[in-house]
């Protein structure tokens, strides 16, 4: 890029009233393509999935200030056919509880609530057990049993979480907002082979007319959602950290099995760790250039 071109880009960035667009125009002074992610927690997961892609490796990334900032810029750019943005950016956004989504050559909406839903899976948990709990060939039968317990406990958790999340989904889509639980573990007890809704749980209810046609419509929509769309991703990630921590305590107590887990704390588990052994989702693969 010539010095004149660089100056033009800097001037455009300064004149733009959209902070994200400013960042993009500044980045275009150095690279042709920019990958834009919702937040700082999302980046390590996408980076893990995309790092082997040549196009991504030769681009740069920007962390936006949430989904709304991305979709607002995308919608405005589409409206005015802003090719500078539409041809140079690759946006990724969560689905959340929104009914609509954005998908085309430059934007991809996940097929789950948020990225955490994808990284809690059998491949990731099995790999974690091998690495951090050091379950090798002599523990093969134990590991098979633990993976069966994981599937069972996750299923129980998701069934309970769906019931708790349904009012959140309906409130969001009628009122345009909803109040989330800070920690799902205050509502659902999460321990290895001990998953249940707490007796003293203060469950958030519906803040809308439950006899309205809109309520029934949204209720039917929610009931058709997959677990990964119905249950908030942060709750699933909270589940796996607490579950692995409880399992670690259980394994340490099994002196006769000769199990010596690593000192790593499951409660400090990072999303990249699980993403590293999670298959790349289909919609992410389809977005690659």
Image: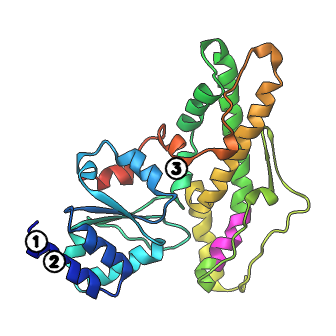
Residue in the image at 59% along x and 58% along y = 233
Whether residue 183 is in magenta: the answer is no
Asked whether disc 3 touches disc 1, contact meaning CB atoms under 8 Å apart, the reply is no
Where residue 255 sits, quadrant-wise, is top right
Question: Residue 207 lies in what quarter of the image?
Answer: bottom right
Mark 3 vs mark 1, foreground winner is 1
| Main secondary structure type of the part rendered in magenta | helix
The local crowd at label 3, few if under 14, some if 14 to 19, many if 20 or more residues have their Cα within 10 Å, is many
Where is residue 12, by image quadrant? bottom left
Q: Give the range drawn in magenta.
A: 164-171
Considering the image in quadrants, where does the N terminus appear? bottom left
Judging by the rendered image, the residue that carries numbered circle 2 is 7
Is the residue 109 above or below the residue 74 in the image? Answer: above
Count neighbours of disc 1 (C-alpha within 10 A) and say few if under 14, some if 14 to 19, many if 20 or more.
Answer: few
Query: In the structure shown, which secondary structural element does the residue marked by tag 1 occupy?
Result: helix
Q: Position of residue 52 (x, y in %)?
A: 31, 41
Q: Position of residue 198 (x, y in %)?
A: 87, 56
Residue at the right extreme? 200
Which of disc 2 and disc 3 is earlier in sequence?
Answer: 2
Apparent side of residue 73 relative to residue 261 in the rendered image (left or right): left
Q: Mark 3 touching mark 2, by CB under 8 A?
A: no
User: Counting other residues with Cα less than 10 Å from the Cα at mark 2, is it few (<14), some (14-19), or many (20 or more)?
Assistant: few
Label at residue 118: 3
What separation in Å lies between label 2 and label 1 (alpha carbons)? 6 Å
Q: Do the residues labelled 2 and 1 touch (CB within 8 Å)?
A: yes
| Mark nearer the viewer, 3 or 2 | 2
Image position of 238 (left or right of 255):
left
Q: Mark 3 to mark 2: distance in Å? A: 42 Å
Residue 168 colored in magenta in the image = yes
Q: Residue 3 carries which label?
A: 1
Q: Residue at x 68, y 37 (%)?
A: 150
């Amino acid at each position: 890029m010539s010095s004149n071109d660089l100056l033009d880009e800097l001037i455009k960035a300064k004149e733009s009233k959209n902070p994200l667009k400013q960042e993009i125009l500044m980045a275009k002074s150095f690279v042709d393509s920019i990958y834009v992610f919702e937040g700082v927690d999302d980046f390590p997961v996408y980076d893990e999935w995309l790092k082997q892609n040549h196009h991504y490796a030769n681009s740069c990334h920007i962390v936006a200030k949430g989904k709304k900032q991305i979709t607002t810029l995308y919608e405005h750019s589409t409206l005015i056919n802003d090719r500078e943005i539409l041809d140079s950016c690759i946006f990724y956004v969560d689905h959340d509880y929104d009914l609509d989504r954005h998908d085309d050559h430059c934007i991809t909406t996940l097929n789950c609530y948020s990225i955490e839903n994808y990284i809690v899976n059998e491949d990731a948990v099995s790999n974690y057990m091998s690495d951090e709990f050091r379950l090798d060939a002599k523990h093969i039968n134990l590991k098979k049993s633990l993976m069966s317990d994981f599937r069972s406990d996750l299923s129980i958790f998701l069934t309970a979480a769906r019931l708790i999340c349904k009012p959140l989904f309906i409130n969001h889509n009628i009122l345009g907002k909803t109040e989330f639980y800070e920690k799902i573990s205050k509502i659902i007890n999460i321990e290895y082979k001990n998953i249940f809704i707490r007796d003293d749980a203060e469950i958030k209810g519906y803040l809308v007319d439950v006899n309205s046609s809109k309520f029934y419509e949204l209720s039917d929509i929610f009931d058709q959602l997959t677990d990964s769309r119905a249950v908030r991703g942060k709750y699933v990630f909270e589940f796996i950290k607490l579950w692995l921590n409880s399992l670690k305590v259980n394994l340490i107590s099994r002196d006769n099995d000769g199990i010596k887990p690593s000192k790593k704390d499951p409660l400090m588990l990072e999303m990249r760790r699980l993403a590293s052994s999670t298959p790349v989702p289909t919609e992410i693969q389809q977005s690659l250039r």
